[in-house]
Amino acid sequence: MHFRSGTLTALSALALLVGACGPQQAAPSDLGPSPGPPVLPTKNPVPLPNASITKIAVAFDISGRGDGGFNDIAYDGARQAADELGAELREVTAKLDDTDDDRAERLRLLAGADYDPIIAVGFTYAAPLQIVAAEFPAVHFGIVDDATVNAPNVEGITFAEQEGSFLVGAAAGLKTKTKAVGFIGAVQLPLLQKFEAGYTAGVRAANPDATVEVTYLSQPPDYSGFGDPPHGREAALGMYDNGVDIIFAAAGGSGSGVHEAAASSNHWSIGVDADEYTLAPESVRDHILTSMLKNANVGTYTFVMSVARGTFVAGNQTFGLANGGVGYSTSGGFVADIKTKLDAFAAQIIAGTISVPETP
């Protein structure tokens, strides 16, 4: 999602808004040994001019790894790169009460311990990274979901969330029987509005007669909408009662409540970030039509390997449909009958024939 920036100490109370919206869970902190994650299959190694990369680090915000969603996906890309390079991979996680100074010190400790490159996951690292990047100009940093850090050794790893959201919106438009669909966002923020805008555009492109009901579970500075499944369920049930038959939930941990509501009322929901069909309880799985995939692993892998290959370029790099950064899931087979149409929309977006809006 996206207002990644600034001194956002108050946001440390979020169950990490990093990455749109996947389920969230607390994780241990600081610079202790990392648990051993499952090793991903590696790609074919290529000759690397920078053979000095032996230590890679990932700094999470408060939810950390283990959410089954966006954070794990971001970690997976770093893990795969580390495996290909034969490098150590360190992960650290912020504490609930961390300040910008705490986050800056965490990055300093990693850089001072010769970790390079270092990936900061989430917008709350933006202000600290702006400071620390200047202190360690030889270290390469990547920050996921932020494009505001301006430094010659920092890459912003961002995503065209609106493009993937367009495709699941098109799926909703093609599948709705009531011609009324919904969008539930965790908090009304610019990043989440990218999801809303893309989804609405996709619905209308596929079904001009369909309407889109939109609600956000909270408004800044209240960020409780990210971790309130009962509120998500209540909001979804209200929409279903109003005639909506499909809801896209870009709502963090609250999305599980939306899936529960879909199952209990025999309607559809749409997941976000990860393929939620594969993660959700069996009791709700068959009501998850599809999921908007935010492939953070593509971004983190590409960043690390650019440093290894000597092709690193500072500035923002956006990952969308054209480079595998976003997409939609097909698990469950519920969109098999419309896949050709969805893929045609994707091809038009990639070709520039369809321009997907980023704001509602």
Image (cartoon, rainbow, N blue to C red):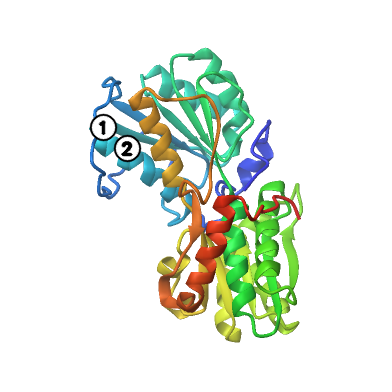
Which image quadrant: the C terminus? Answer: bottom right
* Label 2, residues with CA under 10 Å away: few <14, some 14-19, many ≥20: many
In the rendered view, tell whether residue 124 sits above or below residue 106.
below
| Of the pair 235 and 81, the residue shown nearer to us | 81
Residue at 47% across, 46% down: 323
Q: Is residue 145 left or right of 225 when viewed as pictured?
A: left
Query: The residue under label 1 is which amino acid type?
Result: Leu
In the rendered view, tell whether residue 200 sits above or below residue 91.
below
Q: Do residues under tags 2 and 1 come within 8 Å of each other at their CB atoms?
A: yes
Residue 143 appears at what percent x and percent y? Answer: 52, 34
Residue at mark 2 to residue at mark 1: CA–CA distance = 6 Å
Q: Is residue 31 visible?
A: no
Residue 262 appears at what percent x and percent y? Answer: 58, 79
Q: Which mark is residue 175?
A: none
Residue 301, picture quadrant: top left
Q: Which mark is residue 85?
A: 1
**Residue that mark 2 sits on:** 81
Query: The residue under label 2 is which amino acid type?
Result: Ala
